[in-house]
Image (cartoon, rainbow, N blue to C red):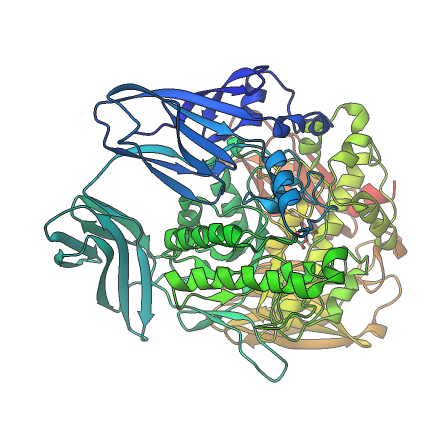
Amino acid sequence: MMLNGVWALEDAQGDYRVEMILPGDGISALFAAGEIPDPYFGRNEHDLRWIADRDWRATRSFTLTATDCDLFLTGLDTIVDVLINGTKVLSAQNVFRTYRVDLSEVAHVGENTIELYFHSNTKEAAKRYAEHPYPVPYLHMNCPIPHGNMIRKAQCDFGWDWNIALAPFGVIGDIELCPQSQTRITGVIVDQAHDGQNVTVTVRAPFESCETRDIPFEIAFCGQSITGVVAARNGVLEAAITLVSPALWWPVGMGEQALHDLDVTLGDSTQTRRIGLRDMAFLAQKDDVGVGFKFRVNGVDTYAKGANWIPADALSGRITQAGVRDLLQSAVDANMNMIRVWGGGRYEPDWFYDFCDEMGLMVWQDFMFACNLFPADAAFLAEVDCEVRETVTRLYHHASLALWCGDNELVGALTWYEESKENRDLYLVAYDRLNTQIERALRAVVPEANWWASSPSAGPMNFGDAWHDDTAGDMHFWSVWHEGKDFEHYRDIKPRFCSEFGFQSYASMDVIRSFTTENDRNIAAPTLESHQKNHGGNARIAETMFRYFRFPTGFDDFVYLSQIQHGLALKTAVSYWRSLKPHCMGALIWQLNDTWPVASWASLNYGGSWKLPHYMIGEFFQPVFVTIVPEGEMLVLKAVNDLREPIDIAVKLAATKPDGSSRILVEVNARVGPDVAKSLAGIATSELAVDEILTYCWTGSDGTEANDHFMLRPYKSYDLVTADLKLEVVPNEEGYEISVTSSALALYVALEASIAGRFSQNVMTITPKTPAKIQFTPKTSGEVPIFTVKDLHSATYG
Ligand code: BMA
């Protein structure tokens, strides 16, 4: 019996009494009841922090016909007492765990009450901080609400450089009553051994039982089954099945995502998992340069293209499966094959990883520790131990699961705080205790798991600056955004694997409209400043525009250009790093999604629509891709092929003037082998006249057709002319086909529709000779959209 649904919520002072839907959070409940305004609108956030400072109580009743049942509670957020008929049965203190409570002694046949007493998380965190024998610092810059690091709750709930700070309370998972069974399977852990053709699947199912006789079991997988009996009362059921040449699971773009049901039955308990068969190797090996970092799937080295994932919403009550699926699908649609579940959020629910399995999206899974320092006393470590074991047991079987990573940026964080700078010994030892505890708990469940101690890291036992070390391990390369370096600086490094880098932009206009009034729509308006959580972020966006562009004309031009420069920053990095393959084997953009409407590094808007950079990502993550790499006085044309077969590629490179007139410089036809980056041609920069830019297009035998441009100097130094863009819109079955023509060179041509939907491409280089045809697919049918268009000239030369 699910106890999800409607509960009664009241604060301990008795001021509020509203309905609360579980799973859900208290702030969403207060908003739904009309007690508070929309937290995401305007500057409302700042008037709502009192909610987290109170204690709250959620109650409901339920009827039992028998009392021998267990209560399962997942995602109690966070310091929560559970009372049944007034008797306390649980004191929970870790949102990342599932708790089980035996109700047989406290419940009765008939009506019972359950109460969740939510202690103020902020007060409890502050109390723990005060009681701790030495100060445990947290990142003030990110977290307006202090001391979140003292409790096991999503760290970004206390604010982050992209998050609203509300420290919500509630329940993130299910509350379920189950009849006590004789036998209970508590996990299904699946190991795979691939020997080229055959796959041996070893299933380990820990269980508890109060049976007095032998317990029969059956494990059924891919048409085979193993049966037998176990004599033990508690233990691990273990069996292996070997399959000959089974259909394998591949990351998207490399093959199909075959998934097979695995059924494990022990006595009266059955568990089912969907298993994808794949050999997921993580290789961090010493080489001539330093330490490599790559994934090898089914024997094939795989360039990881992806982004970092943060929680789908700041308020868990607003998260839906459909919304999350849509965000992940957008990652795949932009040619990504990996997502990093970042350590300042949460372990996601089972269905999240099911979606990733289905979509072929590899998952890099952090453990939930980020940027702050953390306690390392016995009680804290005991919580961590339970959390890690439960999480690994729950998630390990997923085909998409590629890597377990100890934390986000905790090694670097040792250098950020006065306390840890002054007494590095203490904090380094505490860090190592925590990190070792995480690794031990992981290995206790899966000895052979793919493990990386921290991100970024230059490798085992290396506690140096992995942010800037491009010889070893993974990097978080933030010099362009956080240190204000030029975009070109992305080409000064050769990462082995860049697991974080990014640039910010504003949310799209429709999203901005959703949280502002007319007066707020100005880059310096207090509401827009409040919807920018990175100190100096708006100034960095504006200042970067000065470096590269003429200044935009109106507010919506500014928003447009912020997104173009966001995409340009990412493209500069990725197109170069992909050309370094196999030295560099991955680029994960910071960040995919937003938790609320905010200016941020996300390429998707809050709500899931595509910002312009997301369209650009789709282009520069294409499996067959051509780019220009400046090398001294030369511009080198490079092709990258991520496919497993060779392709024939034809590239035309021209010098084009702002009026659209152009002359061909190079035409090449080349065969590019599987999985390589290759130089195709080079031209001297001196071949370009001062007002010429490079335009180039390529076609691949795999069907790729694309084009791009490259400028030697900042855009602002070219005298662009009006391109007189014309749209011709023809309705068709899926929506609308739009033809765009221009009378001159038009850069960063971007379409906008008055209704929600997706363009087949956007952000285009259009010349009189190369018009564009775009499909627009509305999200819902009905209203006829109005299309508008911008390009660099219209937005910045007005
Ligand atoms: C990285 C992340 C986050 C942060 C982002 C942008 O370091 O790990 O902590 O939001 O940078 O600053």
In percent of width and height, residue 236 lies at 25, 58
State the image quarter where residue 684 is shown.
bottom right
Q: Residue at x 69, y 61 (%)?
A: 414
Is residue 754 in view from this perspective? yes
The answer to whether residue 726 is above or below residue 452 is above
Please state if 650 lies on the left or on the right of 269 as rendered.
right
Image coordinates for residue 259, horizontal then vertical, percent: 32, 55
- What percent of the width, then of the height, locates residue 392? 41, 55
Observer-nearest of 779 and 734:
779
Q: Is residue 155 left or right of residue 571?
A: left
Can you say whether 59 is above or below 284 in the image? above
Q: Residue at x 74, y 65 (%)?
A: 490
* Quadrant (top left/top right/bottom left/bottom right) for the N terminus: top left
Relative to the observer, which residue lies in front, 582 or 23?
23
Q: Percent position (x, y) of residue 49?
A: 67, 29
Q: Is residue 660 above or below residue 283?
A: above
Q: Residue at x 79, y 55 (%)?
A: 660
The mark total stands at 0
